[in-house]
């Protein structure tokens, strides 16, 4: 079984298309989207359309939830630019887009065989805003995973690819398709790296491999698309990209 894990596209269709082109060469039996499809980037509708055509296995990210319940977004980050960007994204979407977002699930549990499974979430199994980092202390991680077990767990949210072992469970962060961070946490504004990230999981007869992929993108094209959009914070968003 070969599973592609995509996360945190954030309305960046240029980077998503680069990942889909790479995925076509790699192949996958199924695709799981780990959340945050549309907000913060310049092409929310087009991005949702591509994911809708790609998979029906979608995790509800915190930004997906903010489109359905904008008050939660304001509570999460009560600053003007964030509220304006969420509001702009909401106005771009059609009723069918919101219906699709409502099909996203907090958790997806995929059987790998009769005895092993893959648990997919956005931030952590308990919260779509939980941040599991390479530096998260083991005792803190115990609490974040309390009540949940799987041979492999996969999430996103931090925008930083990661793989770590915890009490026998392999925990993967698939990285960010549309806004990969140089580091997390960060001070002030994040530095966005000049590639797109996703991960492929291979499982065969109890043996597995993890391929964390970085795909070259056209950063100039990303910036041009953003600057030609009506996205309210587009100039600041463009400044964050590392050439």
Image: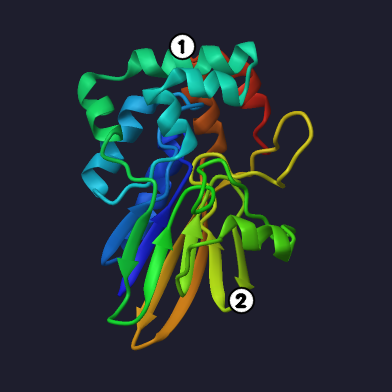
Q: Quadrant of residue 68?
A: top left
Q: Which of the two discs, 1 and 2, labels the residue nearer the N terminus?
A: 2
Q: Quadrant of residue 206?
A: bottom left
Kindly identify the residue that appears in the image at 72 percent across and 30 percent down: 189
The secondary structure type at the circle numbered 1 is: loop
Is 190 rendered above or below residue 19? above
On residue 230, which mark appears?
A: 1
* Residue 111 percent location from the top left of the image: 30, 71
Q: Nearer the viewer, residue 222 or 233?
A: 233
Is 18 rendered above or below residue 240? below
Is 47 rendered above or below residue 29? above
- Disc 1 crowd rating (10 Å Cα; few below 14, some 14-19, many 20+) is few
* Residue 135 percent location from the top left of the image: 74, 59
Can the viewer see residue 26 in this picture? Answer: no
On residue 167, which mark appears?
A: 2
Kindly identify the residue that appears in the image at 39 percent across and 67 percent down: 118
> Farthest residue in the front direction?
147
Side of 153 where 240 appears, left or right: right
Side of 68 where 30 appears, left or right: left
Kindly identify the residue that appears in the image at 40 percent across and 36 percent down: 37
Kindly identify the residue that appears in the image at 28 percent across and 34 percent down: 102
Image quadrant occupied by the N terminus: bottom left
Q: Nearer the viewer, residue 101 or 17?
A: 101
Cα gap from disc 1 to disc 2, whole angstroms: 47 Å
The secondary structure type at the circle numbered 2 is: loop
């Amino acid at each position: 079984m070969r599973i592609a894990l995509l996360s945190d596209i954030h309305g960046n269709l240029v980077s998503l298309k680069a990942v889909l082109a790479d995925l076509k060469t790699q192949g996958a039996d199924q695709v799981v989207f780990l959340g945050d499809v549309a907000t913060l980037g310049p092409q929310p509708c087009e991005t949702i359309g591509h994911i809708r055509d790609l998979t029906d296995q979608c995790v509800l990210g915190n930004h997906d939830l903010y489109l359905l319940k904008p008050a939660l977004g304001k509570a999460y980050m009560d600053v003007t630019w964030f509220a304006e960007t969420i509001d702009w994204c909401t106005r771009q979407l059609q009723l069918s887009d919101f219906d699709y977002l409502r099909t996203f699930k907090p958790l997806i549990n995929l059987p790998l065989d009769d005895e092993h499974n893959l648990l997919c979430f956005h931030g952590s199994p308990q919260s779509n805003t939980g941040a599991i980092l390479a530096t998260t202390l083991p005792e803190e991680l115990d609490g974040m995973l309390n009540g949940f077990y799987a041979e492999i767990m996969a999430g996103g949210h931090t925008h930083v690819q990661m793989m770590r072992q915890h009490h026998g469970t392999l925990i993967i962060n698939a990285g960010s398709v549309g806004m990969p961070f140089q580091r997390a946490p960060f001070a002030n504004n994040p530095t966005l790296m000049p590639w797109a990230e996703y991960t492929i999981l291979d499982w065969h007869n109890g043996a597995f491999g993890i391929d964390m992929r970085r795909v070259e993108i056209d950063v100039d094209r990303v910036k041009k698309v953003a600057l030609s959009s009506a996205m309210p914070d587009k100039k600041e968003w463009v400044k964050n990209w590392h050439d």
